[in-house]
Amino acid sequence: MAIRSGLIAIGPYERRNAIVEMKMKRGKEMTIVITMTDKGPRSKKAKHGRPKYMTEIDGKPAFYRAMSGLGAVSANRHVFVAPSIAGARAFIEGQCGQLAITDYRIVLYDFEISGPAECVMVAAPHLPAGKGLLIYDIGSVTAPLEVDPGRLCGDGFVVLPSKFGNGKATGAVQVENPDETCRFSEDGGGVYYFKSAALYEQLYYDCYVHGGEPMLKGGRQIAPLYGQLLRQGGTVYSTVAVR
């Protein structure tokens, strides 16, 4: 919701969103990276050769449906990372216009990418090192996920579909076992938060370049980075209890 001077009467829902948006702007600045690798563990082959994010569901592109759940965090800068195909830039620009997203960058690549974790690294030049990093892998998410910036805490936070974890979404469950974090990717991806872009880059190199972490289905996934973070003494939380 845009907050303008002279706004007289707003309902409780709009007031709540306005308060969340103002708190987010003051206290938790971040860059949102939208990866569109179309190679997530749950992604299906696109119809008619089109990438999954362009296919329509109930009259709306999957891209629009996925992005509509970001809510208050959408005021931050977005960096879209996608394969360089005909019409990709124009499509993303058009969708940003419909979603009222004005602060964004589009990064198109024409080389092989091994999973969403590596896809994020393609956007590294556009990520301020000290700001928080929110990653939305829409190539592997099949339904919109709501992101409440007030929940994001710790060194890392994962927002997963509520249908996992016995069907109950929880506010903030601390994850303690590094070996359980791979399940974040197995459960269908989600929204991944790291307290800074610099932390993400460090974890990526520790995990996949220096550490030789085995790749999961779909290539270099983001989830194992949380296991690396826990082993280094960091704190990780999730909206869904991890067994």
Image (cartoon, rainbow, N blue to C red):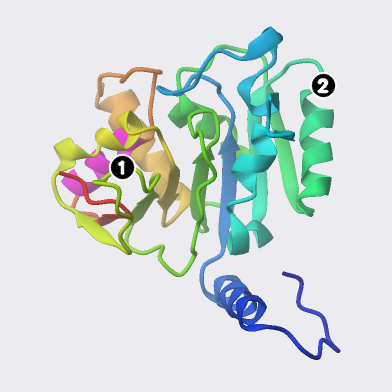
Amino acid type for the residue under numbered disc 2: Gly
On the image, the x and y values in percent for residue 18 come to 65, 77
Quadrant in which the N terminus is drawn: bottom right
On the image, the x and y values in percent for residue 129 come to 52, 52
Foreground pick, 205 / 68: 68
Disc 1 crowd, CA 10 A, few/some/many (<14, 14-19, 20+): some
Start and end of the magenta stretch? Answer: 223-231
Residue 126 visible within the image: no
Foreground pick, 162 / 18: 162
Which image quarter: residue 174?
bottom left
Above or below: residue 120 compared with residue 229: above
**Residue at the front extreme, as displayed:** 58
Q: Which residue is mark 1?
A: 164
Foreground pick, 113 / 101: 101
- Left or right of 100: which side holds 38? left
Element marked by disc 2: loop
Alpha-carbon distance for marks 1 and 2?
35 Å
Disc 2 crowd, CA 10 A, few/some/many (<14, 14-19, 20+): few
Above or below: residue 159 compared with residue 185: below
Q: Residue at position x 49%, y 22% from top?
A: 43
Q: Residue at position x 20%, y 46% from top?
A: 242
Q: Is residue 30 magenta?
A: no
Amino acid type for the residue under numbered disc 1: Phe
Q: Residue at position x 77%, y 45% from top?
A: 96
| Circle on res. 20 | none
| Circle on res. 87 | 2
Element marked by disc 1: loop
Q: What main secondary structure does the magenta stretch of the protein show?
A: helix
For marks 1 and 2, the one nearer the N-term is: 2
On the image, the x and y values in percent for residue 28 come to 51, 68
